[in-house]
Image (tube, helix red, strand yellow):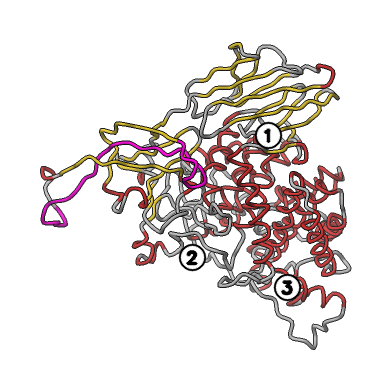
């Protein structure tokens, strides 16, 4: 399968186009202010300031031996700027903006001015001393920052054709290639925080230089080999080992064993899915069957045993990590926004390797739930952690929940999630469609206009829909010279029935691995209508998930719902869905940006008259209770209060 680049997809539907406009109009400018330390009452970013200092050192304007140049922020602070450039580049595909493009060009000039003569580019070591570079690749994030800048350079090249940043990063990649590898005299290391692997594959897509593919494959194949490079590096340079007392040890970096021997997702969740994404890219391009098998094994462990109903992953705050199969706490969850984004990266790459709707199902689940929950409706506040249950009193008084916020924050000292959200949303067009041979696949049901070529002839699809609130998706076909092609659509895993019409007449289709294929080719002027059954549904977790036993979640289509205090009052843990009735759904355009609100009558359990702590089961009392459910992604956009996804049966 091949993706269709962002320039060829224009998103038009009400749900996503509004969110993307918010990213362009508010989020990108807001984050630019943050990167320049101009947001009041927030932690400074220092990202631009660090590059200005590094550029002054590189030019000789600042004599590092005499001046006290200081680096500020996290060791990976450069990556925040890289992700901002990438998000901005993607936004130019569908929203040309001369002022924004000029700002990007100017900041690229600054970035390139900081680059060393040999290609090295990392402000932390340029400012603190180049003699320390590549002495702590486990934790110093040099190759992580390179990976994000390389992805930004590729995105900007595709959007504008400009290659200044791309050429600068190729020079840095050349340095990495000269430094790391199997050859004698090279370091046998690999990135501590993965992302460079899939970035190199994006570069290879542009350059077709086998050196770039070889380097990506080397990093994947070398990871976890014995002797463990990170352990040797720690001992040689006396680096601090943060995970000395941990249960996962070098599994934190997915470096505990070679990737083909890894059967369970372990360690830092973002690092893990970034690694798996790079593995899938290399496996697909090289045809490496053993690597494909490893990807498949790890995919199944993540989505079948360690993924939340919202598409969030990484259940533990310690190490921002996976724990063990079926361990999915709701209040104590970490569920980093970046991890859900990384899961979409992995899913898309698995989809390109294997045509199977389960991968697009996971993309959809994460996009409509665990990703956009990370940003407020106005685009100015963010969640790093995405809980499935919150009681503000507990958050403020229970040290175990110190990582959870009941309200989104303006910014973070470690601000990886906000720019990651922006680049995910501005690149959304590249996830909707894929092509293979004579077939065009509809992976996501997002209103859009798409242009591509099939057998050398240009075709256009015009997709209109009110999805996810309504069940109808309409597709109008335009093609040169009446060129015929095969149209395939995902049959969502949540859907229990659907009808398909072609030019107003119901037609049959055959299903294969989660996609529906029309019996006859489509051509210019054809109109296809997909109608999904989309009632309110009630979902159970596998009983091995001990935190959700005896509980139910509410969904409509791909959207997970929750109860929030604003609508239902306090003590949400007292609510039971037993005896639910009067189920009603209604689109409310002026509520939370326009949502389908679900109401029903259920029950509330209440205690003895004396409010004693314990009482006999015969004294259990319940009364009817009106409930209002809103989409999970929209919670915490009103007042601070309780929230829960899973409700007692």
**Disc number for residue 245:** 2
Q: Is residue 61 above or below residue 609?
A: below
> Where, quadrant-wise, is the N terminus in this rendering?
top right
- Upstream in the sequence, badge 2 or badge 3? 3
Q: Is residue 106 above or below residue 96?
A: below
Q: Nearer the viewer, mark 1 or mark 2?
A: 1
The one nearer the camera, 348 or 90, is 90
Determine crowd level at label 3: few under 14, some 14-19, many 20+ residues with C-alpha closer than 10 A. Answer: many
Q: Nearer the viewer, mark 2 or mark 3?
A: 3
Q: Is residue 155 above or below residue 431?
A: below
Task: Write down the residue under mark 3.
Answer: 50
Do callouts 2 and 3 mark residues in contact (Cβ within 8 Å)? no
Separation of marks 1 and 3 at Cα, in angstroms: 40 Å
Do callouts 1 and 3 mark residues in contact (Cβ within 8 Å)? no
Q: Is residue 190 above or below residue 506?
A: below
The one nearer the camera, 202 or 321, is 202
Looking at the picture, how far across and down is residue 327, in whole percent? 42, 47
Determine crowd level at label 1: few under 14, some 14-19, many 20+ residues with C-alpha closer than 10 A. Answer: many
Q: Is residue 400 left or right of residue 67?
A: left
Residue 20 covered by magenta stretch? no
Separation of marks 2 and 3 at Cα, in angstroms: 33 Å
Determine the secondary structure under disc 3. Answer: helix
Determine the secondary structure under disc 2. Answer: loop
Q: Which residues are magenta?
A: 587-614
């Amino acid at each position: 399968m091949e993706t269709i680049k962002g320039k060829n997809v224009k998103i038009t539907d009400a749900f996503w186009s509004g969110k993307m406009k918010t990213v362009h109009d508010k989020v990108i400018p807001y984050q630019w202010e943050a990167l320049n330390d101009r947001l009041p009452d927030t932690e400074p970013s220092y990202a631009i300031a660090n590059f200005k200092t590094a550029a002054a050192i590189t030019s000789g304007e600042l004599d590092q031996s005499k001046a006290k140049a200081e680096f500020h922020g996290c060791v990976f602070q450069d990556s925040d700027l890289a992700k901002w450039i990438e998000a901005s580049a993607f936004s130019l595909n569908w929203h040309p903006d001369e002022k924004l493009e000029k700002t990007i060009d100017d900041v690229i000039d600054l970035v390139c001015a900081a680059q060393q003569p040999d290609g090295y580019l990392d402000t932390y070591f340029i400012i603190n001393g180049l003699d320390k570079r590549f002495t702590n690749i486990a934790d110093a994030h040099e190759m992580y920052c390179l990976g994000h800048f390389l992805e930004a350079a590729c995105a900007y090249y595709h959007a504008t054709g400009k290659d200044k940043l791309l050429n600068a990063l190729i020079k840095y990649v050349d340095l990495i290639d000269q430094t790391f590898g199997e050859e004698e005299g090279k370091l046998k290391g690999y990135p501590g925080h993965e992302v460079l692997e899939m970035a190199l594959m994006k570069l290879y897509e542009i350059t077709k230089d086998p050196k770039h593919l070889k380097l990506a494959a080397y990093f994947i194949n070398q990871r976890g080999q014995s002797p463990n490079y990170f352990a040797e590096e720690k001992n040689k340079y006396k680096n601090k080992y943060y995970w000395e007392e941990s249960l996962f040890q070098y599994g934190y970096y997915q470096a505990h064993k070679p990737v083909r021997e890894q059967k369970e997702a372990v360690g830092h969740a973002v690092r893990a899915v970034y690694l798996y994404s790079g593995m899938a890219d290399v496996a697909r391009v090289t045809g490496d069957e053993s690597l494909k098998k490893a990807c498949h094994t790890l995919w199944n462990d993540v989505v079948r045993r360690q993924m939340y109903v919202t598409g969030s992953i990484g259940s533990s705050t310690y190490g921002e990590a996976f724990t063990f199969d079926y361990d999915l706490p709701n209040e104590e969850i970490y569920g980093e926004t970046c991890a859900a984004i990384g899961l979409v990266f992995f899913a898309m790459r698995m989809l390109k390797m294997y045509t199977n709707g389960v991968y697009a199902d996971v993309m959809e689940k994460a996009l409509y739930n665990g990703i956009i929950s990370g940003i407020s409706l106005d685009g100015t506040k963010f969640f790093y952690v995405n809980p499935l249950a919150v009681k503000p009193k507990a958050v403020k008084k229970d040290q175990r929940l110190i990582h959870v916020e009941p309200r989104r924050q303006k910014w973070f000292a470690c601000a990886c999630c906000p720019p990651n959200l922006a680049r995910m949303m501005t690149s959304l067009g590249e996830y909707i469609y894929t092509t293979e041979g004579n077939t065009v696949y509809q992976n996501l049901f997002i209103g859009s206009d798409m242009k591509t070529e099939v057998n050398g002839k240009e075709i256009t699809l015009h997709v209109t829909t009110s999805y996810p609130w309504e069940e109808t998706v309409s597709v109008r076909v335009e093609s040169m010279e009446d060129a015929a092609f095969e149209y395939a659509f995902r049959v969502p895993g949540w859907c229990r029935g659907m009808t398909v019409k072609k030019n107003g007449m119901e037609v049959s289709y055959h299903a294969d691995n989660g996609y529906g294929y029309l019996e006859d080719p489509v051509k210019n002027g054809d109109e296809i209508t997909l109608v999904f059954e989309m009632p309110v549904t009630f979902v159970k977790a596998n009983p091995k998930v001990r935190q959700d036993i005896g509980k139910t979640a509410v969904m409509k289509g791909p959207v997970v719902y929750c109860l929030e205090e604003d609508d239902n009052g306090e003590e949400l843990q007292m609510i039971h869905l037993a005896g639910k009735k009067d189920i009603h759904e209604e689109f409310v355009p002026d509520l939370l940006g326009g949502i389908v609100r679900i109401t029903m009558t259920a029950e509330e359990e209440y205690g003895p008259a004396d409010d004693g702590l314990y009482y006999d089961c015969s004294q259990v009392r319940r009364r009817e209770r009106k409930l209002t459910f809103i989409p999970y992604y929209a919670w915490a956009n009103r007042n601070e209060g309780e929230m829960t996804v899973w409700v007692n049966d």
